[in-house]
Amino acid sequence: MGKNKLKKFAQNELFAHVIQPSSSEVLNTDFRLKGKWNEEFGNANPIVLELACGKGEYSVGMAEIYPEKNFIGIDIKGARIFSGAKEVEEKRLSNVRFLRTKIDFITSFFAQNEISEIWILFADPQLEKPRKRLTSSIFLNRYIQILQPDGLLNLKSDSTDLYNFTRDESIPEFNAINGAVSFEKKADTNALYEEGIEEFDETMQAVLNIRTFYEQMWLEQGKKIMFLSYGMRK
């Protein structure tokens, strides 16, 4: 491991808003903050998750747009989290936390109905391993356990494969099996900036215009950006 990564890992330990549990704290057990995240933030505001957050651009950007909400960026890569954590400190944002863990353990960290919204942004489409996609039935079953009855699930991606899989396969199949507990489509565009963004209000447009490191890279390559949003029905 490079010295720069080790330095960032050490720096993360000094950030009060970065939480890095050990495997023993989450493996086959519940994390100490499960059901208590509002206490961690010191308010009763809605909690929004950014999964596979990378450098945390969305967590930071949304926290600035929505000071009345709390945001948690989740990623296993500590060196990536460092960038967002440093920005949170510099901007003195009190409504952001970063959680370094595997998304597989998400139900060990959050209680039933504790989360109001989930964002999946430019996740690995896992072309060879559909079960590992963050919108596969395995993960959808985890999300419904922590999302509130009116919670939202949002996907923003450059991957046609992940977009089509989510819209045409995974969620329809999940809904067919689960019936009363299902996802209702709220928004759908395969060309967000060309034809889809104007359908949203100004605040949501500002959110959708947040550019992650990877999104900027894909846009420079001429790729189109796709967006899906679903509301929970419980």
Image (cartoon, rainbow, N blue to C red):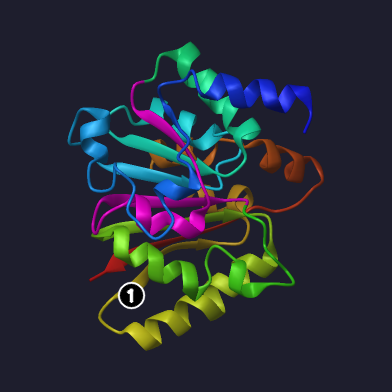
Q: Position of residue 137 (x, y in %)?
A: 48, 75
Q: Position of residue 119 (x, y in %)?
A: 46, 50
Query: Please, is residue 24 above or below residue 131 in the view?
Result: above
Boundaries of the magenta span: 94-122
- Relative depth, front residue between 169 and 85: 85
Query: Please, is residue 19 above or below residue 51 in the view?
Result: above
Q: Which residue does the image show at 55% across and 80% down from the upper left?
A: 169
Labels in figure, total: 1
Q: Which residue does the image show at 35% across and 50% down from the upper left?
A: 109
Question: Mark 1 belongs to which amino acid?
Answer: Ser
**Mark 1 falls on what kind of element?**
strand
Q: Name the quadrant of the C terminus.
A: bottom left
Q: Name the quadrant of the N terminus.
A: top right
Query: Please, is residue 232 above or below residue 202 in the view?
Result: below
Residue 195 seen from this side = yes
Residue 200 seen from this side = no
Residue highlighted by disc 1: 182
Q: Which residue does the image show at 48% across and 72% down from the upper left?
A: 138
Q: Position of residue 7 (x, y in %)?
A: 67, 20
Kindly indicate the quadrant of the structure image that contains residue 161. Answer: bottom right
Q: Residue furthest right?
A: 221
